[in-house]
Amino acid sequence: MMTADDITAAFERIRQEMARIDAVAPLTPADQEFARLAQAYRHASESERGTIRSLAPPKDSPLFWVLTIRAAELALWDADPAHLEDALAGHCIEDFKTDSRENLMTFALIWYAAEQLKISAEHLFARAAELASPKAREFLVEFAGRPKVQKTLKAMDSEALEEDGRIRFRPLPPPWRRAKAEQPKESTRPRRDGKS
């Protein structure tokens, strides 16, 4: 088990590595440190998991969201569902300390990746719920129980794009910008009836 000092040091290493991260690199030191922390969380006792959660500062929530997205991408890159387990453990560690909408959006990416790998997303979420705090458990169970249409990338304003031979997730523009982009542009040519 990682000690409190080990966990605090892991968070600091993740922050330092995220400052230097190359978004195109398949696997970075930050991803590796995140995986190590997620695996320690999954193998910890209930009280040890509580300690890990308590040591995750709310200011690091955005780092966890980025790392869980990268873990879902890595799962597709490596065809390895262990990255999805890491991603869900990351959500358990972050424990919905700030904006739960960000967590829910990344749940859709994890769900998508699980479906692409032909593994049971329901089973992944159920296992993560067993390791979560009551608060996080509620979100995990609620998301898994949603109708399929509400768990799609589009429903969560995201898309999967292939870049450099691998799948990358990107947020869609906000609905008001999408609607504007989808509208046909009016012609700037003068009308034949003389009206403008």
Image: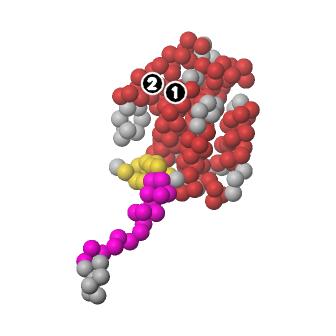
The residue stretch that appears in magenta: 172-189
Residue at screen point 73% across, 39% down = 138
Q: Percent x, y for residue 36? A: 54, 26
Q: Amino acid at mark 1?
A: Asp
In the displayed image of the protein, which residue is found farthest to the front?
195
Q: Which residue is mark 2?
A: 15
Image quarter of the N terminus: top right
Foreground of the two, 61 or 183: 183
Regarding residue 118, the answer to whether it shows in the image is no
User: In the rendered structure, does residue 173 fall within the stretch colored magenta?
Assistant: yes
| Badge 2 vs badge 1, beta-carbon distance below 8 Å | yes
Q: Which residue is mark 1?
A: 60
Foreground of the two, 80 or 193: 193
Foreground of the two, 20 or 86: 20
Image quarter of the C terminus: bottom left
Is residue 146 depicted above or below 182 in this figure? above
Marks 2 and 1 sit apart, C-alpha to C-alpha, by 8 Å
User: In the rendered structure, does residue 158 fall within the stretch colored magenta?
Assistant: no
Q: Amino acid at mark 2?
A: Arg
Label disc, if present, on residue 14 of the rendered structure: none
Q: Which marked residue is nearer to the observer: mark 2 or mark 1?
A: 1
Residue at screen point 54% across, 48% down = 109
